[in-house]
Image: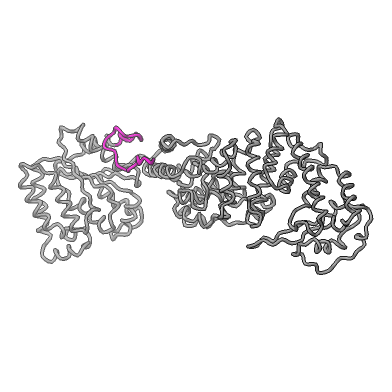
Amino acid sequence: MFDATWNDEPLSGPGGDTLATSHVAKTAADVISAAHSAEGSVVFGLSGPWGSGKTSLIEMTRRYLTDEHSSQGWRIVDFTPWSTSGVDVMLTEFYATIASALPTQGAKTARKALTGLVQVSAIGLKAVPGAGPALSGGAEALAKRLTATNWQRSFNAVSMALRDLGLRILVIVDDIDRLQRDELVALLKVVRLLGRFPGVTYLLAYDEGTLFSNLQSADLGAEGREGARLFMEKIVQYPLTVPPLLRSQMLNMLDSGIASALSELEREINEADYRLSMHVDEFESQLTTPRSVARFLAQIRLHLSMHAVGEIDDVDLILLTFLRVQFPDVYARLPRWRRRLTHSPSMWEMASESNKSVDWSPLTEGIGGEESRADARAILTSLFPAIKGDASREGPHVSSTDYFNRYFVHAVPPDDISDSMIDDALQQAMTQGAGIDRMSSMLNDANHDRADLAYRKLVRHPLNKEPSTVSTVLIENVMSILPELDDRSGRGILGLTMRDNVVRWAGDLLRRLGTGTPPSVVAAAVSACGELSLRLNVLWMAARTGESEAAVPLPLTDAVAQGVRDAFPEFLRHLELRDAAPAEQHVHVHLDFVAAFGDVDTAKNKIYELLDREVTVEDVAARCLTLQYLYVEKPVARLGDFDQSLFARFAPAEDQLYTTDIVANVDREDLSWANRRRYVRGRVKAPM
């Protein structure tokens, strides 16, 4: 469950000061107290970037003034100019703020004077020498009816009344850099000229860079940054600066924040993954304020909470969140670059220059400053190995085409399959008597893309990667579903059908069985497949490690021997049927299996016995012809290659077939045995 622990609220006192800046607030309170003048007004400036903690420092300063300087009776009020609309309203609110600091008793004269000043204050922006042009339509209207003398008289009346009261008033004006240019200039004139009352101190807080930029565009004679700085020197007598966020402070905030999020969400980061520590420099460069760190941590917590454990890589998500927070334009471009970012180059590509020709620079377009562009590139390269020409990481990484979308929709998309479902399917298939309906449903999904995805995830799953976890129960269950798998749609990896793919997987599982597995148990597991040709294909892939039966791995000896016993009689029955034999039965596989693992001489003699009757050498040759499939919407079978080497193992040395001419224009899509005999004529050579 997501725990929203960050709300960007300022500290109310030094108790929560994890960045150790309370000493700055205490110093500010002491200086404000010491610099107070009953005859004049003092302006303090607190500068720092947005999110650096200015408001928290203000609140701590307020607390120190009220607690440690309580005997001086400070009256602290807040003026929020950016919440007003228009210069006239801002002036009215400003004087209303001063009035709110007055005591309820004994300040009648001061209140009356302030009321009179409010009525003429707008004209003051134009009338006071050096104040510049009028800044609003309201000021222009008042200028027609009032004179500077009216304003000066009212101002003097307020000043005298406040001097008589002997008050200590602090007006806090936070975030003045939020103001529009004209409003900012108006506020500074108010503080510098229209609000310099005796006993009133101002504390202005702002981001210096933004403030200077606004001042440079105003008609104040403050040309350039230096001009803006000199202008502010006329306004602020005591400039204070928020201490910068130190590297150690940033790292402590990040480390404790990420650890807390992982703990609360019951997640763990792989100890062997050092990528977060590798990007400390990028974090330091970009996360320069407490707010930016806290905001990043809040986004990490939010995004991690959207994913079940194990469905994504947490380090990938953290780094991708960093991109989204600091470089939103780069993050927004990533989905359009998916194919290139998730590409895993072949060995040939990695050895050549072809994989290094991609121009990745458009990904970081628009980022200001080479340092920031370098930071973005470093994070991108860490997330996507394809950028430096390496293969994508295995597992649930954003660089994997099978997982990429999860990181952007923050869920398992409809065309995806959760890793927990894969876990459940494999666990069921490895449990005796539990069945295999979950795996079967996945591999037979009508959505071919989802079926292919399920196959890839099943094959790559750690449960069947190590010999110690490969069980004969799993092999038996995988063998049992082979006949029901799709064998006609060329939609799988490398154009293979789902059945082709699972045959390869079953062979790989057999090959990785431990040497102590009883051969009889393995043979029983293999026999769970009801189709002989499929069993032979699986065994071929698992056992073909040499040219003799002795080379067959020990656990497979019984299964291979049984395969030979089943394969050759089936081939002979097929041969005897001649043209009545099933056209798409792959008896080529049967004979090939016997040639690899059986007694070839005995098998040859059995074939010769049939040749003495109605069966011809041409019939044998026709069964050494493979089939090929053109994978279109509905795959079409056609005659393939003639296997001369296989034929030569079992054929007689002499026959009239060897001297016939090639038959031209044979229809290769005609799979009848008569047409196959026509096709092999002239292509068959006598055994050497």
Residue in view at x 69 percent, y 37 percent: 524
Rendered location of residue 255, percent (x, y): 44, 36
- Color scheme of the displayed model: one colour
Q: Is residue 117 left or right of residue 171?
A: left
Q: Given the current orientation, which residue lies at the most extreme right position?
A: 654
Please determine whether, in this image, residue 660 is positioned above or below residue 277: below
Q: Given the current orientation, which residue lies at the most extreme bottom position?
A: 665
Q: Is residue 118 visible?
A: yes
Residue 354 location, quadrant? bottom right
| 6 falls in the magenta region | yes
Q: Given the current orientation, which residue lies at the most extreme top position?
A: 516
Rendered location of residue 555, percent (x, y): 73, 34
Over which residues does the magenta segment extend?
Answer: 1-24
Q: Is residue 94 left or right of residue 658?
A: left
Please determine whether, in this image, residue 665 is positioned above or below residue 490: below
Q: Is residue 293 left or right of residue 87?
A: right
Rendered location of residue 75, percent (x, y): 16, 40
| 548 falls in the magenta region | no
Rendered location of residue 50, percent (x, y): 34, 47
Residue in view at x 21 percent, y 63 percent: 136
Prevailing secondary structure class for the magenta stretch in the rendered image: loop
In depth, the one of 501 and 408 nearer the eye is: 501
